[in-house]
Image (cartoon, coloured by chain):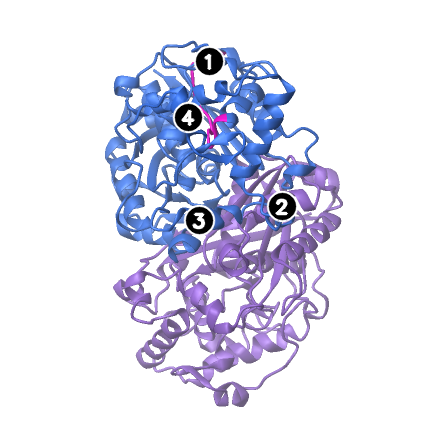
Chain colours: A purple, B blue
Amino acid sequence: MDVALLGGAMTSFGSRDGWVRDLASEAALACLDDAKIAPADIDHLYVSNMASGEFEGQTGVMNALAHDIGAVPAYAQRVGQTSASGGAGLYAAWQSVASGASEMTLLVGVEKMTHLSTADAGDIIASLTHSVEYSHGVTLPSFAGLTARAYLDRFDVPRESLAHVAVKNHANACKNPDAQFHKAVDVETVLSSPVVADPLRLYDYCPITDGSAALVFCPASLAREYTDEFVTVAGIGGATDTHVVHERADPTWMGAVADSARQTFEMAGCAPEEVDVAELHDMVTVLEVLQLEAFGFADRGEGWRLAVEGTTALDGDLPVNTSGGLKARGHPLGATGVAQAVEIYRQLLGNAGDRQVEAERGLTCNVGGFGNCVTSALFEVDT
Amino acid sequence: MDVALLGGAMTSFGSRDGWVRDLASEAALACLDDAKIAPADIDHLYVSNMASGEFEGQTGVMNALAHDIGAVPAYAQRVGQTSASGGAGLYAAWQSVASGASEMTLLVGVEKMTHLSTADAGDIIASLTHSVEYSHGVTLPSFAGLTARAYLDRFDVPRESLAHVAVKNHANACKNPDAQFHKAVDVETVLSSPVVADPLRLYDYCPITDGSAALVFCPASLAREYTDEFVTVAGIGGATDTHVVHERADPTWMGAVADSARQTFEMAGCAPEEVDVAELHDMVTVLEVLQLEAFGFADRGEGWRLAVEGTTALDGDLPVNTSGGLKARGHPLGATGVAQAVEIYRQLLGNAGDRQVEAERGLTCNVGGFGNCVTSALFEVDT
């Protein structure tokens, strides 16, 4: 069954007041408004969230949201996949409609984190890693440092190339009213920012973010009754890699991304060259580069060139992270994968404002942990 | 698409050593053994779990499990629906196969709780309720007390009738090697146990439990290649009720159970009278009674008679909670809904040992919160 996106919306990302439920309601209601449907039209509600219980002491967010927006008695479920909870939500919502269980599914990704210190939030995030690594103090930011060092050394890559990813994504975020940062940075700023995990520095990393994003999924046949132009899910997939990162033969190769990409392209019946725009999981600059390689947008060891040469810029052949990405739009864990798809939804329908690119086919990739679990999805315009 | 259960297994329930991951692995490997498949045959892995992060500081359990049992690169996702996470897992696994995304899905429900005090575990569980109720100190056990009082008063029900539910389920658990309690109780014991929330007493409530249960789902057409006799999912559904329990017009009517039941029976094309055995969510005795009414197994205000008159006993017309139920098999939140289906799976295939009943069609009902979200499923034997 062809599955369509009938609506999409997001809150502004950043440091937000309110509870996780308030953010989720704001995105949900804006999304229903965008889809021109009522809460009572929803029969299934999925909430992508990593850790509302740990962050805020609330574990019934999906039930609260169904209640708060007036969607009861719609079925409600939480979808979790750590930092890829949003991407897993896309997959769950797609399955809900494709299986025939649902005629109208609302997916809401949400996370509220900034009321905690970065250290406390970081401790909760680190609980997604394997205990044999976590117990030695290895966290996601330090994995990134180790991986960046290995990548730079093996392929003789200039350090400043990674900074270009941050520069590009900050520039894009300046054109996205919903982004956390509206602050352009240059290569020098990135390279002189404080060291986090050598060789990576503060501006290589995404921030701690509050926010929510939402999408409505329905059969394409039903979407046609509501609107002439809509977006469909052409391909979708997901895969895991070892939960213990140090067991990977090559930590610079994102195996789960490659597996997920293969599934996604096969289902869509298309090749990497046919993708017009992509939102990749740039939790840290080096991850955008490694994903470009795992998706086949660049050869091994060559992904770093795309930001340097402008290929992934707004006016390049393959604009990547037009939203600003996790780096500058922000990364509210459970919301991120949904926000990625909201950006593609807006780009494909020509609603991306000052950052609009020409695109008929757009890709999202959401990464849990350090590539421990990945989902990807390919969206097309149906006219 | 017809979806089959190719295998099912569970750990013993109770106070268990080890981490949540150890329990999940134990159930998963036993289940793969029962299904006669290898970890590498699995393409999708769903882990039903309410609160491993809060209970144990681990949030990446699905990725850890994929790693630990050798299922990488299978896609892995966590399914959450508070105390109905297991039932939501059945629905997610069914959708995974029915949508065509998966050919072989492993569902593992798991929770590890007994290393915490009952008070601390209870605080975490209470986080699933609405903040406007939680902040006034209302917890699930106290909701049960209020509801039992309303039910007994309105329908002029004898208090001791609820005790018969506990007596029956404890008796059944004595015949279930995997159950937490192997201790028969009589009505007098229940009625003289300490008051928890008047009129309910200690033996009206389920315990705090560790445990895990697992099932393999695949297309029925594929199951036929593995085995001559298997169980299929005939119907499945889910629904929410108000998250604020005090907003319900009638707290003695489980609206979400009735909604979920209607969906399940409609999909299966059968009526309540055609159900041979059922596992209901007896977190507290009165809930089994209310579910019997919401499913249409008894008229309003008459559900209490079924345990008193022996209708729901092992040798009755509709055996309910042959496993011992949440009450005496135990209630490891995320594992419960899966364990319910494992019991039905065993009953339908004639593998229920001393508690075996005659059944070709069995029902499960898993309740989140106090009826805030419900899933139900109907299983049949395919021969």
| Contact flag, marks 3 and 2 (Cβ < 8 Å) | no
Per the model, the C-alpha gap separating discs 1 and 3 is 33 Å
Q: Which is more N-terminal, label 2 or label 3? A: 3
Q: Quadrant of residue B6?
A: top left
Which residue position is annotated with label 3? B119
Per the model, the C-alpha gap separating discs 4 and 2 is 28 Å
Question: Which contiguous range is marked in magenta?
Answer: B274-285
Subunit ID for the residue under disc 1: B
- Give the residue drawn at x 47%, y 86%: A194
The secondary element bearing badge 4 is classed as helix
Which residue position is annotated with label 2? B133
Q: Nearer the viewer, mark 3 or mark 4?
A: 4
Subunit ID for the residue under disc 3: B
Which residue position is annotated with label 4? B190
| Residue type beneath disc 2 | Glu
Q: Which mark is residue B308?
A: 1
For label 3, count other residues whose C-alpha is less than 10 Å away and answer few (under 14), some (14-19) or many (20+). few
Residue B130 image offset from top left, x and y in percent: 61, 46
Is residue B259 visible in this depiction of the protein?
Answer: no
Per the model, the C-alpha gap separating discs 4 and 1 is 14 Å
Residue A173 image offset from top left, x and y in percent: 63, 73
